[in-house]
């Protein structure tokens, strides 16, 4: 039951997107710019090929970190893990700032939106702020909830006499009184209990981070999948396919690294990996299905796409900066090694630069 609750939000968002996009079809009140259109049968073949190419690259990207037991270099205990994760975080950060947010500004300030309110208020920036603040609130509330629930379980077990000494320390259940000689514990026991408590807290943070990050990725993955699926220009399809393969692979590695650190059960890890792998291909499939009636310049489509894009941008920027980069860059292990610290900074910059350069084509 608990596992199902963890994945209700991503499923709900995906279903809402499908319903909104159905309403967007055939509602064009603004003339599209002239653009060359290739043979329908040819573009359909390329779009289907793009679907499978993105499915494979995304699956490989998100799965590699999950195979750390067989690929030691990808283990969270290795320095290379920090370097790879920094590169992926740079990709995610650039995706939010360079790819998604500008698209949201373009959609929400389009001349196809006749109402003056869209031209006079910066809804795209406002939506990104709401997305970032909302992510912070969810991040904080979810972490606090899971932490309190964990401590309540320890406290209840302690009252029932079902908790060991180490667990008692981890839950802060200090109930001993020893008369004249007071309450004394060995320093080693205290150190171990503090380490256990910290590891439990970090595990909770990693689990919340991975789920919120996946939610943000899913939102924009559906949008970019539909954009590719509805495209009728062969050159655009080829360019988008190459860019999205690169994007999905490294974004998948970033998400896969978070899932690995969260130490979910195998079934939950597989479900999260599948959700990531299939979201963009499903968006492409939906785009192919509605390409005859869908108009990306209809007011409804522009508002829906722009709104979801701007919120997704806020989510991804927050997650990349706070939960991925800041968490790792402030890690005592990384700060104790100058070469590793330099390597992670360079890796992050290279990842952000590579994804930024792709904005020239997609």
Image: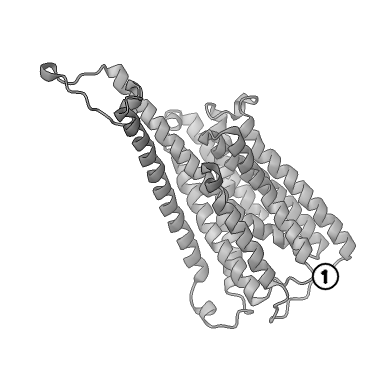
The correct choice, above or below, for 265 with respect to 355 in the image is above
Q: Do we see residue 360 in this rendering?
A: no
Secondary structure type for disc 1: loop
Percent across and percent down for residue 166 are 34, 22
Front-most of residues 61 and 204: 204
* Identity of the residue drawn at 53% across and 83% down: 116
Percent across and percent down for residue 38 are 86, 66
Left or right of 190 in this view: 347: right
Q: Which residue is the extreme one toward the front?
A: 160
Quarter holding the C terminus? Answer: bottom right
The correct choice, above or below, for 155 with respect to 91 in the image is above
Percent across and percent down for residue 88 are 59, 42
Quarter of image, res 76:
top right
* Identity of the residue drawn at 87% across and 65% down: 40
The correct choice, above or below, for 321 with respect to 29 in the image is above
The residue labelled by disc 1 is: 36
Front-most of residues 340 and 69: 69
Left or right of 24 in this view: 119: left
The correct choice, above or below, for 116 with respect to 200 in the image is below
Percent across and percent down for residue 82 are 53, 34
Left or right of 338 in this view: 111: right
Within 10 Å of disc 1 (Cα), the crowding (few <14, some 14-19, many 20+) is few
Left or right of 26 in this view: 45: right
Q: Do we see residue 185 in this rendering?
A: yes
Report the coloring of the rendering: one colour
Quarter of image, res 111:
bottom right
């Amino acid at each position: 039951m608990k596992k199902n609750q963890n994945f209700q939000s991503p499923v709900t968002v995906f279903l809402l997107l499908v319903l909104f996009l159905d309403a967007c079809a055939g509602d064009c009140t603004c003339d599209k710019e002239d653009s060359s259109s290739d043979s329908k049968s040819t573009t359909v073949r390329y779009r289907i090929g793009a679907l499978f190419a993105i499915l494979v690259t995304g699956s490989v990207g998100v799965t590699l970190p999950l195979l750390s037991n067989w690929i030691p270099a990808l283990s969270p205990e290795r320095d290379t893990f920090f370097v790879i994760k920094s590169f992926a975080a740079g990709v995610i950060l650039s995706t939010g700032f360079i790819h998604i947010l500008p698209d949201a500004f373009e959609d929400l300030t389009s001349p196809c939106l006749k109402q003056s309110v869209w031209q006079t208020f910066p809804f795209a920036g406002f939506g990104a702020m709401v997305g970032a603040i909302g992510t912070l609130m969810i991040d904080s509330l979810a972490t606090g909830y899971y932490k309190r629930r964990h401590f309540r379980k320890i406290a209840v077990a302690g009252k029932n006499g079902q908790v060991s000494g180490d667990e008692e320390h981890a839950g802060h259940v200090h109930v001993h009184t020893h008369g004249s000689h007071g309450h004394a514990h060995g320093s080693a026991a205290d150190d171990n209990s503090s380490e256990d408590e910290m590891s439990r807290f970090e595990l909770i943070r990693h689990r919340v981070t991975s789920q919120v990050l996946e939610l943000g990725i899913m939102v924009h993955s559906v949008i970019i999948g539909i954009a590719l699926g509805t495209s009728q220009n062969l050159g655009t399809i080829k360019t988008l396919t190459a860019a999205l393969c690169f994007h999905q692979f490294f974004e998948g590695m970033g998400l896969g690294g978070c899932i690995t650190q969260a130490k979910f059960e195998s079934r939950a890890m597989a479900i999260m990996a599948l959700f990531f792998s299939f979201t963009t291909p499903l968006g492409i499939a939906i785009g192919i299905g509605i390409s005859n009636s869908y108009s990306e310049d209809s007011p409804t489509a522009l508002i829906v796409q722009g709104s979801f894009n701007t919120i997704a941008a806020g989510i991804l920027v927050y997650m990349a900066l706070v939960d991925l980069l800041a968490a790792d860059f402030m890690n005592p292990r990384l700060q104790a090694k100058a070469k590793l610290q330099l390597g992670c900074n360079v890796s992050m910059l290279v990842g952000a630069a590579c994804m930024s350069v792709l904005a020239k084509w997609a």
